[in-house]
Amino acid sequence: MSVELVPVNEHDPAIDRLAMTAGEFFRIELERLSPASLRQALRERGVSVLKAETGEIPGGLAGYVVNPANHRQATVAVAGFEPEGQTEILQALIELLRAAARIRSFVAVVRADSPLIGTYRGLGFTSVGALRSSRYHRYRRHDELVLHHEPAVKEVPADAADQ
Amino acid sequence: MRRINDLVHMRPLARPDIPGRVAVLADPLVRRNISGLFALYDDRELTRFFVDIVDGHHPSRMEFVLCKKDGKVIGYTYLLGIDQPNRRCEIAMIILPEYRFGYGLAATVKTYDYAFGVLNIRCVLNEVHAENVMMANRDVHTTRAQAVGINAHFTEGRLGENYLWTETPESFHRHFGRYLSSDSEDES
């Protein structure tokens, strides 16, 4: 099953739709968030947003922010409009960034009780720690889990990559 | 210890400060402790970046100048990723190499105090290059790290790790509260 990702600008109706979901996206708690606030938060974080053009599976949005201190690393996030399909969207984003932007490692930061953790782990992300009290959600502070994923590089021999 | 407020003053970055702010990024000792990718930007681009901040075009970032009582600049401190819904931000600072001993702690406390006491931030994220040589107390980032950023920065030609940890108002007062009291005795 293939997922095609296309870039969207902040005025795309999909952004309005995202604001009505109950999940999270780049440390933004989407619950009861106005579309204008969501656009502002995405702008401040420098998020590039892509929309999943899907056939059989429900759509969703994926996004990335390239690490300004290592342009081969990006923080990624996914927000599906339905629970299923998020793994495929995230997988498509990772493959796209590896192929088109030479991104080699991926970071995700999610609320420690997020249902998305299983999605990330399923794609090979592993936990590199938890940041205490760094998220506010539903009247209290939550920890955030930091996940890291560095897919194996198959096409370039390791000794060549060091040069 | 001298009272923090007697040691370091903090004022917003203004246009006349920008040449100094740009120049500090070229200092070899400073460069060893920040992303090497600054080398991709020339002075004109960096100047434009700081002018945009001073003009208010980056609301999630605040830049300050750190000075001695006589107005002499000792470094720069900044808050970035200011995230009001989560009441969260990151802090970073650059102390001029000649002042790095004796002023780093004061600058750190002043910056935290601004974040918690003025902006009402509830969580400050600290992210320190694992091989940082500018921190007088290098144990801090290894003992307090809550997460490790693998290959999180490119400095001096290679990828390296970052240590990340959060400071809350409670942990800040636990670790630094003794420096905040304006009634404390001046021991210097």
Image: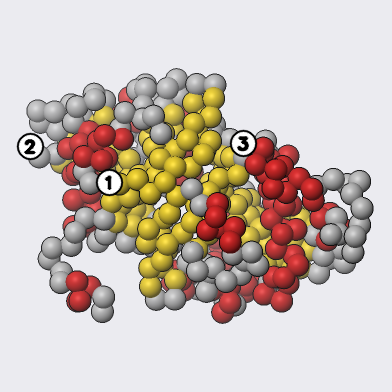
Residue A71 in the figure: left or right of residue B111 = left
Q: Nearer the viewer, residue B86 or B100?
A: B100
Tell me where residue A32 sits by quadrant: top left
Q: Is residue B153 above or below residue A125?
A: below
Give the residue at mark 3. B122
Question: Residue, x 12% and y 66% (percent of image)?
Answer: A155
Name the residue type under label 2: Met
Q: Is residue A75 above or below residue B107?
A: above
Q: In the rendered structure, which disc, 1 or 2, sits on the residue that comes first in sequence? A: 2
Q: CA distance from mark 1 to mark 2?
A: 21 Å
Give the residue at mark 2. A1
Residues tagged by mark 2 and mark 3 found on one chain of the structure = no
Name the residue type under label 3: Arg
Q: Please name which of the two marks, 3 or 1, marks the residue nearer to the observer.
A: 1
Question: Residue, x 69% and y 47% (percent of image)?
Answer: B175
Tell me where residue A111 sits by quadrant: top left
Give the residue at mark 1. A125
Question: Residue, x 76% and y 67% (percent of image)?
Answer: B102
Q: CA distance from mark 2 to mark 3?
A: 43 Å
| Chain name for mark 3 | B
Q: Nearer the viewer, residue A123 or B41?
A: A123
